[in-house]
Amino acid sequence: MHSTPLPQFFSSPPPKEEYTLARRALWFFILLHVLVWTLIPNGVRTMLPMDALEGNVWGLHFHWGYDRNPWLNGWLTRLAVELGGQSDIFVYLLSQLCVALAFWSIWRLGSKMLSPFQAVVSVLMLEAIQYYTLAAVDFNDNVLELGLWPLLVFLFYEAITRQRCRDWLGVGLIAGFAMMTKYYAIVLFLAMFAFLVWHPKARKSFQKQGLYWSALLFVAIITPHVIWLFQHDFVTMRYALGRVHDNQHMDFWHYIAPGISFGTMQVVTFLGAVALASVVWLRPLNLKKLGRGVSGESHTTAFSSDGGLLMNGDVAFNRQFLWFVGVGPYLITVLLALLAGWQLYTLWGTPLLGCWGVILLYYLQPVIKRVRFYCFLAAVLIVFSAFIGGYTFVMLKPGNTSSGNFPGRAFAEEITAVWHARYKEPLAYVVGDRVLSGSVTRYSPDEPQAHLDWNSANNPWIDEKTLRRKGAIFLQKLNEGDDFPAEIRKRFPDLKIEGIHYMRYVRPAADSTPIAVLVGVLPAEY
């Protein structure tokens, strides 16, 4: 008996055609993601999120470090602000370019080990993880890590397998940038070093010049920051350690509970991606008969960006590489948290899950025919639309009191007017918490410097003698007291209370109470 051949739509395309189709689908979705997730926040938010405001404050001063992070975050945020002027669109674009970089890097790594369809699934399944969607709206160190870590992993794989000097230089460059984004990159470096020592093929790197050139470039990038740390009492490191150490008087359970919670939440977060990827294992309901007997072995080859054929390589090598570098940072983080009792926040795990999709597809090796691939793409678009729709609905809903509805622009204009009612000179300084002072710094036409939290140790670029001479506006939410702290009164005895300013969120609920801000003026010595 002769079986009836299946229509081309339901069959597996030739490898070269599959690669072309997969690449086009990936780039279409990356461009769609970047475009929509840039335009929607820029359209529905009234001002930048807090971390981006903070990055703009830092970026006004090109230092080699700041009170909470090394320098890369602040420098890039300021660059985006300069490009956008009064528009925040380039800051939102910067976030989405980090997501695009993550997707591209994971695709390039996955293409070394998986079929083209599998590699795309390993990337786009991440669209179901909030780290790549909702959390990526706020450009900060976590979002920068989101893009830099997968790129570093891909370059590291290339460097070990090809031993080209340019790949190793890429490793050193991106490792330096990752370290200058957040010290958390150390856990990835530990995992990479462990693999270099563990695997015989990787150990050959110690006999090559490329590894040492990479290390030299890395040291050159971080050295200015290290010198800056010595000059500023290691303020950034003290802040980082202070965030994780808040457990001096805990019993054993509360000592280890944060590490367990953090580890569990990363797994739970990834389950959304697993649910999305499960579409490739499901047969379309009306096509069971037609699809019967179609499955076969998956492709064992992949294609490079120019269409050149790439071998999958040593299976054992790939498996161990994925475990060490893909899962290793997660395990190291959880282990350190358990041993040291670190207090960890779920979003700190933002860069940890990037390679997990590749690992899942590498082990399960689903046979993905054309029809299943299209079903998966349809599911991705549904999830994408749900995140966008949900985010837009929440932001536009009356009564939303997130920073996206804080009247930052109007507030900045009002505070600037308070100053200009007294002085013709531009407002040079604004003092207060990070949201209030950060919004005035970002949106005031005078672009004043922000003295964050009136803490000199955290604002080494602020010269208080100059601040006293040029004067400043002081800001404090009224629920924190109807007068400025006694310490501030002592440091700035000439500070005068100007009054209480009231404002409402841009989309207030009918029964919402206004935001009350205590405003003080430190007179200028003109």
Image (cartoon, helix red, strand yellow):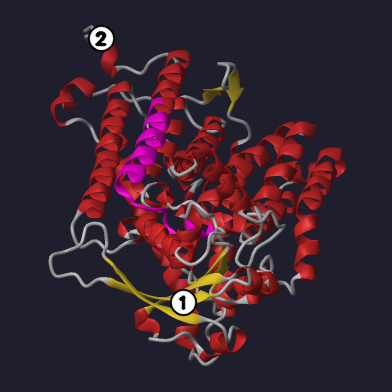
Res. 319 visible in picture:
no
Q: Residue at x 43, y 14 (%)?
A: 17
Q: Residue at x 44, y 38 (%)?
A: 123
| Viewport quadrant of the N terminus | top left
Indicate whether residue 400 is drawn in magenta: no
Q: State the SS at label 2.
A: loop
Residue assigned mark 2:
5
Residue 402 in picture, x, y percent from top left: 31, 62
Cα distance in 3D space between marks 2 and 1: 81 Å
Q: In the rendered view, does 192 fall on the left or right side of 129?
A: right
Q: In the rendered view, does 130 fall on the left or right side of 192?
A: left
Q: Are marks 2 and 1 in contact (CB under 8 Å)?
A: no
Residue 410 in picture, x, y percent from top left: 35, 57
Residue assigned mark 1:
520
Q: Amino acid at mark 2?
A: Pro
Q: In this picture, which residue range is highlighted in magenta? A: 28-55
Which is more N-terminal, label 1 or label 2?
A: 2
